Image: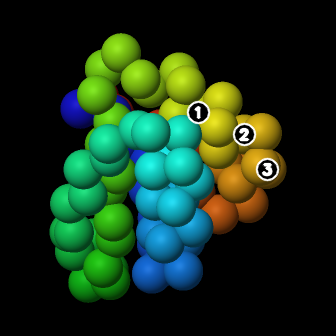
């Protein structure tokens, strides 16, 4: 499963605001990484992933605060 990765609540909030502004409905999963730190996995419906990537890239968000889409 592909997801955007936010490593703190500020990144999560900014990402969610931008996605909701574009009328996208993200799902957020909170997980512990291997270092015991909380991570937020932000998933988007398959048909909207490209639109979400464009939205975040247009605001230079992906480049500095969200790790690129992760997945198998």
| Residue 70 percent location from the top left of the image | 41, 39
Name the residue located 72 percent from the left edge and 40 percent from the top edge.
Answer: 57
Q: Is residue 30 left or right of residue 25?
A: left
The residue tagged 2 is 57
Callout 2–callout 1 Cβ contact below 8 Å: yes
Name the residue located 64 percent from the left edge and 37 percent from the top edge.
Answer: 55
Note whether residue 67 is visible. no
Q: CA distance from mark 3 to mark 2?
A: 5 Å
The residue tagged 3 is 60
Relative to 49, residue 65 above or below: below
Crowding at mark 1 (Cα within 10 Å: few <14, some 14-19, many 20+)? some
Q: How many marks?
A: 3
**Which part of the image, by quadrant, shows the N terminus?**
top left
**Which part of the image, by quadrant, shows the C terminus?**
top left
Q: CA distance from mark 3 to mark 1?
A: 10 Å
Callout 3–callout 2 Cβ contact below 8 Å: yes
Helix, strand or loop under label 1: helix
Note whether residue 7 is visible. yes
Relative to 21, residue 37 above or below: below
Helix, strand or loop under label 2: helix
| Residue 2 percent location from the top left of the image | 33, 33
The residue tagged 1 is 53
Q: Is residue 8 left or right of residue 57?
A: left
| Residue 31 percent location from the top left of the image | 20, 69
Name the residue located 33 percent from the left edge and 65 percent from the top edge.
Answer: 40
Name the residue located 33 percent from the left edge and 36 percent from the top edge.
Answer: 44
């Amino acid at each position: 499963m592909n997801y955007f990765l936010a490593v703190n609540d500020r990144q999560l909030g900014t990402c969610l605001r931008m996605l909701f502004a574009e009328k996208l409905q993200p799902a957020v999963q909170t997980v512990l990484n291997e270092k015991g730190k909380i991570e937020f996995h932000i998933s988007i419906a398959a048909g909207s992933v490209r639109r979400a990537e464009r939205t975040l890239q247009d605001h230079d968000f992906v480049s500095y605060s969200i790790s690129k889409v992760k997945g198998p």
